[in-house]
Amino acid sequence: MIDRYSRKELKNIWSDNNKYSLWLKIEIAAAEAMEKNKIIPKGVSKKVKSKAKINTKRIFEIEKKVKHDVIAFLTSITERVGKEAKYLHKGMTSSDVLDTCFNLQLKQSGEILIKDLNLLLTSLKKQAVKYKFTACIGRSHGIHAEPITFGLKMLSFYQEFLRNKKRLLNAINEISTCAISGAVGTFANVDPKVEKYVAKKLKLKVEPISTQVIPRDRHAQFFSTLGIIASSVERLATEIRHLQRTEILEVEEFFGKKQKGSSAMPHKKNPILSENLTGLSRLIRSTVLPAMENISLWHERDISHSAVERNIGPDSTTALDFALIRLNDIIKNLNIYPKNMQKNLMLTKGLFFSQRVLLELTTCGFTREQAYSIVQKNAMQSWKNNTSFFENLSKDSKISKKIPVNKLKKLFNLSYHSKKINIIFNRALKK
């Protein structure tokens, strides 16, 4: 991922230095286990710890010649450690190191993403509670439907990201496995006790059965989860973009004093951050399909997945980290305009009370079809002439015969639509 959309914490996880440091950590842990089980002489791991240093430049130099990254790494370590290094990697295969390391990097990335989600959840909850009873119009198909509250909107997103947090925790758990099983996964040349020791040392679980690689369905679940979270990011970003439109302007991204909105039009204040998140979400989701396709490797292993993962691992996690932090900043600093919400609520002159009138008529002797026809006729008249829905209804003799004006007026009470808000909040926020 390019620097523009990267934060230091995630960049460090996917740096060459961190990767090779994890490789060394895995090799040392395996050596400790082998010493413990009298497979290699004592003192090897201690010597490697004290002498080994990561030199990325040297590793790349060797790799250019040998065309194999793990061999290049081991050769560079041998140059520093000496003869004891010959006991490193005993009975192991490259995938033991590569896959265990990749899972560790995904786990490390996932743990940062959990922190990001916690920040966003806090901001969403704060806005939900603050605007719990701030009425605004709900829309379906982009058209005014019935009133909700802005707090309820925010609570909906809060719950969605709470589910995303649960999904990500499950995905991290699924990916947190270690395989030190040797060629084709049979443990022919390495004791399963080594794998158990390394897994415990690295705070991973033993992979129950590997081929020569850790099964890629685990990774597909992880990247699919990132894709789902990205879609949630886009849903919230899209909502903000819609609500910031000039003719609506119920919310607005924070706009700094020295900020410029357009190179040509000085009046512009554009929802650029939310638009950016829409683009990043598309990018993150694009990693899901290749992750799915990586499941189908030839026999016990091939490396068709390798180039894919070297790209989508850092790119998807880094982009999502950036997106979640940006989204949190948007929500935390969002300009919210209750007066505009009230103005938009009244645009249709009470049309959103149509369902309540419909239901009342069905209790007064009309069939649902008859009641619908009467209400729709008056509603369409209000749409066409931009007139008061209540006044149109009160002049309709079919209605006035059944519902007195005073009773009809009571049907146009806005608080009717928020009477269950506390129930929804209590249900959504219960621990």
Image (spheres, rainbow, N blue to C red):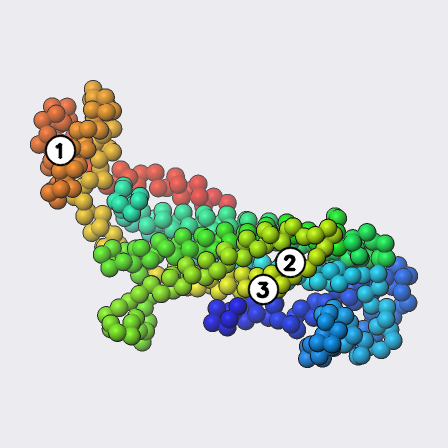
Q: Amino acid at mark 1?
A: Leu
Query: Disc 3 and disc 1: Cα gap in Å?
Result: 63 Å
How many numbered discs sit on the rendered protein? Answer: 3
Ranked by sequence position, the earlier of labels 3 and 1 is 3
Can you tell which quarter of the image residue 233 is in?
A: bottom left
Which of the two marks, 2 or 3, is nearer to us in this view?
Answer: 2
* Helix, strand or loop at mark 1: helix
Q: Which residue is mark 3?
A: 311
- Residues at badges 2 and 3 in contact (C-beta under 8 Å)? no
Q: CA distance from mark 2 to mark 3?
A: 10 Å
Give how far across and how far down residue 15 sits, in percent.
62, 71
* Category of crowding for the residue at label 3, using alpha-carbon neighbours closer than 10 angstroms: few (below 14), some (14–19), many (at least 20): few
Q: As displayed, is residue 25 above or below residue 54?
A: above
Give the class, few, some or many, for how many residues have Cα within 10 Å of label 1's Cα (few <14, many ≥20).
many
Residue at 70% in and 76% down: 64
| Separation of marks 1 and 2 at Cα, in angstroms | 66 Å
x, y percent for residue 5: 48, 68
Mark 2: few/some/many CA within 10 Å (<14, 14-19, 20+): some
Q: Nearer the viewer, mark 3 or mark 1?
A: 3
Q: Amino acid at mark 3?
A: Asn
Q: Please tell me the numbered disc located at residue 18.
A: none
- Regarding residue 50, the answer to whether it shows in the image is no
Where is residue 44? Give x, y as percent: 86, 70
Could you tell whether 344 is left or right of 150 in the image?
left
Provide the residue designation for mark 1: 393
SS category of the residue bearing label 2: loop
Q: Is residue 300 above or below residue 354?
A: below
Decide which of tag 2 and tag 3 comes sooner along the chain: 2
Residue for badge 2: 305
Q: Is residue 327 left or right of residue 180?
A: left
Three-letter residue code for mark 2: His
